[in-house]
Amino acid sequence: MLVFAIAVVLLAYAAVGLGLRGKLPGLPADLVVFAALMVAAHVAIRRFAPHADPLLLPLAALLNGLGIVMIYRLQQSGRNGNPGLQVTDLPSSATTTQLLYTGVGVAALVAVLVLVREARVLQRYTYTLGALGLVLLAIPAVLPTSHSTVNGAKVWIIFGGFSVEPGEFARLALAVFFAGYLVSKRDVLALAGRRVLGITFPRARDLAPVLCAWVATLLILIFETDIGTAALFFGMFIAMLYIATQRVSWLLIGVALFLFGTFVTANLFHHVMERFTVWLHPFAGSNPTGIAYQPVQALEGLAFGGLFGTGLGHGQPYYTPLVQSDFIFSAFGEELGLVGVMALLLVFGLLVQRGLRAALGVNDPFAKLLIGGLSFVLALQVFVIVGGISGLIPLTGVTTPFLSQGGSSLVASWILIGLLVRVSDSARGPAPQPIQDEGMTQVVRAG
């Protein structure tokens, strides 16, 4: 399956060469290095997690490779005789840089497998990682605008030519904290309460965790003007709370708080209301200087792609600002069409399904919660960005995992894959077997 994924990436690169220049390109060093990185990741997984789900790495490799190919395609716009516009904010080294971040991500995956031999080891650091996650979220808010703001979102740490989006890593740290906290408090949150209309609602004093998460979400929305991170943070907490307690009432409370917070912030803060205005009336500001120019260009690209797309290298995705990052899905939609984007969504769906399957199969409650929450937030992230680009929901500034240009998102996505691999190895491995040793029963792992 990994060989198949790499072959698809090579075919996509060949299609880009045919589309841009009318001839097959030579085998680039970047894709050779990419294939070597994926093989190295495979060897590491076979060494440190031999029972892990064999589909996780091929699925992630396919998405990562297609993202590199699309960044290369956009980087070539306006060059080599192509009549299209050049993407002005995409440097000539963009493909190599994305490949470098892929290498860092694969190294992070291997580090997770080596250092985290059992997911429950992370439970020891529940509150440490919780504090670290909050600090990572708070740093951009206290930094000067020149060191923290890109395109209106105050979510970066920028010094010199180096930039990192700490929220991508904060999400992983907070997932560990949520899992550890909810495992220890699950009985209280799941059993106590009052039954109303067939639904058991929690006691008032048990609402503190969800209210704290809600307030933190509003603070992110207000001080960092980042709707996407706020939505993912709160959505992950509510999902993990539901997984831990199996109470529908927590979902109802979470949705009610989200809708109320959205209504209040939209009426108090201009940048939130602006997102709703663009969503409801996009073509009112679709001129090049209007606030809806970017999403309208993306919508027109999707429409131009139609059912089967224009073909890689034949479209004009470069008309959409920041198409290589937040709007890379619209580039795939234009050149691969509805069929292509549905295939991409299927790959994401399979990745989420394999994560949820690992969560169901593992016996450790902490690992079950952690991987269930991370699988859900991956699905939510894809839904939020694809729904925003297609006009289904208001647009929020989040990346498409593995596909979008950007180091923080890519490295964090590979760390997530490392955690999925580790838990799936525990879930699929042979069960412990009791043996007799000098009259004492010990439990050892088979093999």
Image: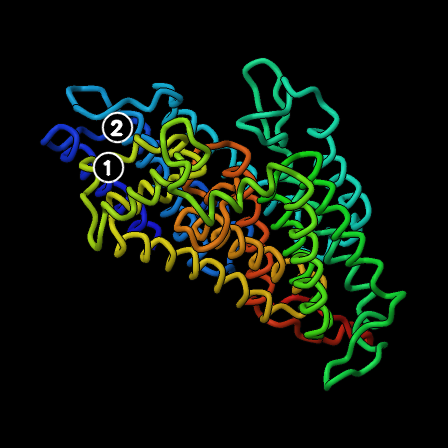
Across and down, in percent, residue 274 comes to 55, 40
What residue type is disc 2 on? Pro
How far apart marks 2 and 1 lie (CA) works out to: 9 Å
| Within-10-Å neighbours for mark 2: few <14, some 14–19, many 20+ | few
What residue type is disc 1 on? Tyr
Across and down, in percent, residue 445 comes to 65, 66
Q: Is residue 224 visible?
A: yes
Across and down, in percent, residue 262 comes to 65, 51
The numbered mark at residue 56 is none
- In the image, 119 versus 259, the foreground residue is 259
- In the image, 228 versus 256, the foreground residue is 256
Residue 73 falls left or right of residue 176: left
Q: Name the residue under label 2.
A: 28
Q: Are the residues tagged 2 and 1 within 8 Å (C-beta)?
A: yes
Q: Mark 1 points at which residue?
A: 13
Q: Can residue 240 be seen in this view?
A: no
Residue 182 falls left or right of residue 374: right
| Within-10-Å neighbours for mark 1: few <14, some 14–19, many 20+ | many
**Farthest top residue in view:** 160
Above-or-below relation of 46 to 156:
below
Res 22 → quadrant: top left
